[in-house]
Image (spheres, rainbow, N blue to C red):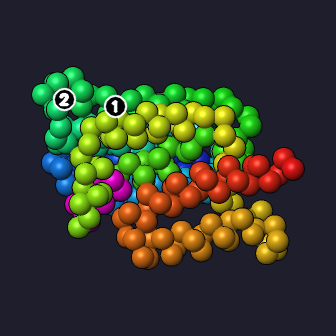
Amino acid sequence: MVTIKKQIPNLITLLNLFSGCIALVFATHTNFEWAFYFVCLGIFFDFFDGFFARLLKVSSPLGLQLDSLADMVTSGVVPGFVMFSMLSQSQNEITTCPVFPYLGFIVTLGSCYRLANFNIDTRQTDSFIGLPTPANALFILSLPLVLEYSDSLFILEILTNQWILLAVILGSAYILNAEIPLFSLKFKKFTFKDNLLQIVFLMVSFLLVFFFHFLGISLVILFYVLLSIVNNALLKK
């Protein structure tokens, strides 16, 4: 019975990995919407494996490593492949270069480095330093959906420009590993004052997704980073 209880969080982690594998299959068939949904499902499992590990008091070094390996697929390989696909499909003067689309996997490399570093960084127990890989994955996975469902020629030109996509890729790899403290969404104390930052973020995020749909998801991640930077500046004063 004890052994089964210890394996519950690990089984949930494996569901994260399984979701990422399915997302990758959909992404290879350019079905980015279902790839996005399965990445969201994987992130859901990623949240609850840690939750149940703490609840059941069965946290272990194995679970920590397994979690990062699962995230490597769901939040590392899948967004890297999506950027590879977007670069492959974009059209401009350097489209003929066969090597260029593979630069999309810089996102995967940046995610891998962050996940490995996260496991040994004792500073990230209550907050984050650099953008978490699940948040980065949501940002990347939302881009082809913004492109698919938007009627704006401006957005079309931006998300089909290979230089802009390359800037997104490099910016993504940087922010994953940047020494920028980002606030946690955990509610440690049940008072309005202590959770004001998280409440403001959640309210604005809801409005952004409600009004802008898939574009809103990209905006939420950008807002999260900017709000953290502003909060850091205010705390230093």
The answer to whether any part of residue 39 appears in the image is yes
Give percent across and percent down for residue 188. 77, 62
The residue carrying pointer 2 sits among few (fewer than 14), some (14 to 19) or many (20 or more) residues within 10 Å by Cα, namely: few
Q: Is residue 183 left or right of residue 67?
A: right
Residue segment shown in magenta: 142-150
Q: Is residue 208 above or below residue 57?
A: below
- Is 33 part of what is drawn in magenta? no
> Residue 81 or 42: which is nearer the viewer?
81
Residue 153 lies in quadrant: bottom left
User: Residue 190: horizontal and vertical position, in percent?
Assistant: 79, 72
The answer, for residue 80, to whether it is visible in the render is no
Q: Kindly identify the amino acid type of the residue bearing the numbered disc 2.
A: Ile
Horizontal arrangement in the rendering, residue 198 relative to residue 235 (left or right) = left
What residue lies at 74% left-to-right and 55% top-to-bottom?
A: 231
Q: CA distance from mark 2 to mark 1?
A: 18 Å
Rendered location of residue 12, percent (x, y): 47, 53
Q: Nearer the viewer, mark 2 or mark 1?
A: 2
**The residue tagged with tag 1: helix, strand or loop?**
helix
Residue to which mark 1 is pinned: 105
Residue at (52, 73) in percent of width and height? 206
> Who is closer to the viewer here, 69 or 35?
35
Label whose residue precedes the other's in the sequence (2 or 1): 2
Return the residue at label 2: 94
- Disc 2 is placed on an element classified as loop
